[in-house]
Image: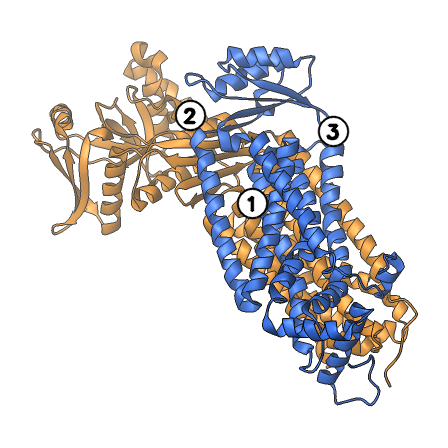
Amino acid sequence: MRRSHFVSLVLVVAFAAASLVGVLSAGWRPVLGVQLQGGVEVVLRPADEISDEQFERAIEIIRNRVDAIGVAEPDITRQGTQVVIQLPGVKDKQRAVDLIGQTAELRFRPVINMFDPYDPVQLAAVKEAMDPNQEDGSDNESSVETTEPQLPEISLSEVLTPPQQDEASATVVLLGSGGQAGFILAPAPLTGEVIAEAAATFQGQWIVNVSFNDEGAVLFDQMAAANYERQVAIVLDGVVESAPTINATEFNGRAVVSGSFDEAEAKNLALVLRFGALPVEFERDDVRTVSATLGEGTLRAGVIAGLVGLALVGLYMLLYYRLLGLVAICSLATSGAILWSIIAWLGESRGLALTLAGATGIIVSIGVQVDSNIVYYERIKEEVRRGRAVRSAADGSFRAAYSTIIWADLASLIGAGVLYQLTSGTVRGFALYLGITTLIDLAVSFFFMRPLVILVARRLVGEHPSRLGVSKKVQEVPS
Amino acid sequence: MSFSLRALYRGEHSWDFIGVSRRVLAGSALVVLICVAAIFVRGLNLGIEFEGGGVWEIPAVSEVTTDDLRDAASDAGMSDARVQRISGGEDFFRVRGELAINSSAESVVSELAQVARVDAEMISTRTVSPSFGDEVAGKARRALIVFLILIAVYLTLRFEWKMALGALVAVAHDIAFTVGIYAIFQFEISPATVVAFLTIMGYSLYDTIVVFDRVKDNERSLSAKSRMTYADLANVSLNQVIMRSVNTSITSVLPVLSLLVVGSLALGATSLQEFAIALLVGLIVGSYSSLFVAMPVVAQLKRRESHWVEQERSAGVLGQSNAIEDAAAVLAADRYDRSSPPRPRKKGRKR
């Protein structure tokens, strides 16, 4: 009996310490939410009813855009009919908001030329071709002379068209979807709005059938006539998804895109064509930008308030329960170590940020955690007053106390589960951390608090109930 | 009945909770009535999350007045902007208003930044579409209904339906009271406040379950021959758990109080304040209601059961002076009866 308590105690402490040390040495830190470090939070909702498939595709597009901005820990989740995008710590906030909200537009651009984005000589040639100052005056001879010495200075980003200048009416330089090929592209004569339907089918090989609306059929034929036997790029969000060669001039509103597609590639292209064609328009339900100073202020206030609160609780427990108060403080510390590890792990592996609401859930849970101690201690004190010896009271009261703790915690878990499933945003973040801390409470109460209390009762309290905060006047000790 | 703290600490107190319960319940009902009336008369001060619109927070670093900022906001296309200066810890201006249809949030930011002579990056913004609030409120309402149904089922299975009813009455009491406070003082309601209301519900239920658990436990340990009314049983149980309730309330309130005092007054983080006020009120009311609302309601329901009516009649015939203390002794005796072989020396009297 005694040994098993000791083992349980050692195991819990070892587990808590190991996870904390592991997390710290791996350099994992909790990811802080937008309200705690500044950044951008956007909630988007599709303006019209859209299918799940369209929704997933739209989220994929948003994710690509966010990656392009270069945010360290973006969190993009679908919550019911909304997309919640959190970009903690993002620098240029306004640009981020603009970029995310944009409607995806599919464009068809005739290909002027292709180049290898890793070849400096070709990059130099592209830069020169695109430079408006040299377009008129330069002849072949002088260009050869000037490009050679400039070689090392030209990087890919200098050549590519920045997203702000990627207008339908401009000549642009863009990359293919894998970044393996560069394209110089002419202005777009038509956009994805003219596509009526696109589907991938298998006819000896994978192909994509595209049909256009009436206006599109005319425009597409015009473009085909002008670019016969040349490539036309299908561009979505500044990325060339495919660049098929036009091999006819009359399409009558139907086109077939063929190539060496595998099934996944063909289906993806059909999706791009279809949803580029039916741009999913998003309404901005909620846009929040938090300046870094405000975020830091809130974080500092929260941390200080939390620490002061903890100190007060610890002091009160010590005054009221004496030695048992010390046990309560140890339980809190153990739970704290485990909680920190879980938050850091969630941030690292899921990109899940600790929000202000989540932090509040944790502060509230201090009360619940301490309550588990109080329920148990009050039972012990009651038994001791009734005349039981401290050691047997500590052993005997746990069952009844833990049953109370389980039933009460179960109600909290039901609440956390319902809120997590049925709400979004702030409330959901709160529910998550409430649930996590309640589970930790159940585990720590059983595997840590109980054995420690029993050990303390045996070793340190013995025949001195006053060390538990029970008044000396014990009425009657049963034989 | 003595109200000495010393007795409380030593566990020698025996308060008659149920005896005064009719008056306490009537008082609580009156307060709830006032709160509900306040909600209807004064209405709730809903934040932009529920009404739509925008909020801009500008650090006060230069010599600029609220009037300057109001003019700037109206230049950017906001007709009814409200500007507040919020000091204490960090000093900043808060501009709130509806955005005109043809103006953009960006133009407001740049206009305000120019007037306040700060970098646009320093301004925190929040814009919400009007339909968003309906959705948030709708979701919260649905979650609330599902939660209450599940809790009712859970408590009925774990205890009995009368206790489920008592717990829900207590929860309704707590929410009405807290929301009433928000209506009376016109504090702003945001999603953060909603989170706080939900916490209060969870906390109140948690507290009530602890009380009910003890009553059930005591009821089970009563032997068939014991004479005890339900009111006595409830009183003994409440006296047993009151110190737990008091201590838990204190330890739960301390962090929240520190959030309120340190967080918002000293450091000026207003977003923390939103949570803290509702939580503080709710935590205190929640502990009160599990002792003085939930259990009395259950006691009123239970004493009508035939078994307890009979107990009450026989107790009435005998007549007694120290009902609660006697009942505690009976309970203690019955508990020893169950847990160990009969002892020659029993505590308490048996009648």
Letter of the orange chain: A
Amino acid type at circle 1 is Ala
Does residue B24 appear in the picture of this structure? yes
Q: Position of residue A388 (x, y in %)?
A: 82, 78
SS class, disc 3 = loop
Q: Quadrant of the C terminus of chain B?
A: bottom right
Q: Residue at x 51, y 37 (%)?
A: A87
Q: What shade does chain B have?
A: blue
Label 3: which residue? B89
| Residue A127 at x, y percent in the picture | 36, 22
Of tags 2 and 3, the one toward the viewer is 3
Q: Residues within 10 Å of mark 3 (few under 14, many from 20)?
A: some
How far apart marks 1 and 3 lie (CA) works out to 26 Å
The residue tagged 2 is: A158
Chain that bears disc 3: B
Q: Which mark is residue A353?
A: 1
Q: Is residue A118 visible?
A: no
Instruction: Select label 2 or label 1 by which is in front.
Output: 1
Where residue A146 sits: x, y (%)?
38, 18
Q: Residues within 10 Å of mark 2 (few under 14, many from 20)?
A: few
- Measured in 3D between alpha carbons, the distance from the residue under mark 2 to the one under mark 3, in whole angstroms, is 46 Å
Q: Residue at x 71, y 34 (%)?
A: B264
Horizontal and vertical percent position of residue B265:
74, 33
**What is the CA distance from the residue labelled 2 to the residue labelled 1?**
35 Å
Quadrant in which the N terminus of chain B appears: bottom right
Label 2: which secondary element: helix
**Element carrying mark 1:** loop
Q: Residue at point 63% right, 66% down? A: B303
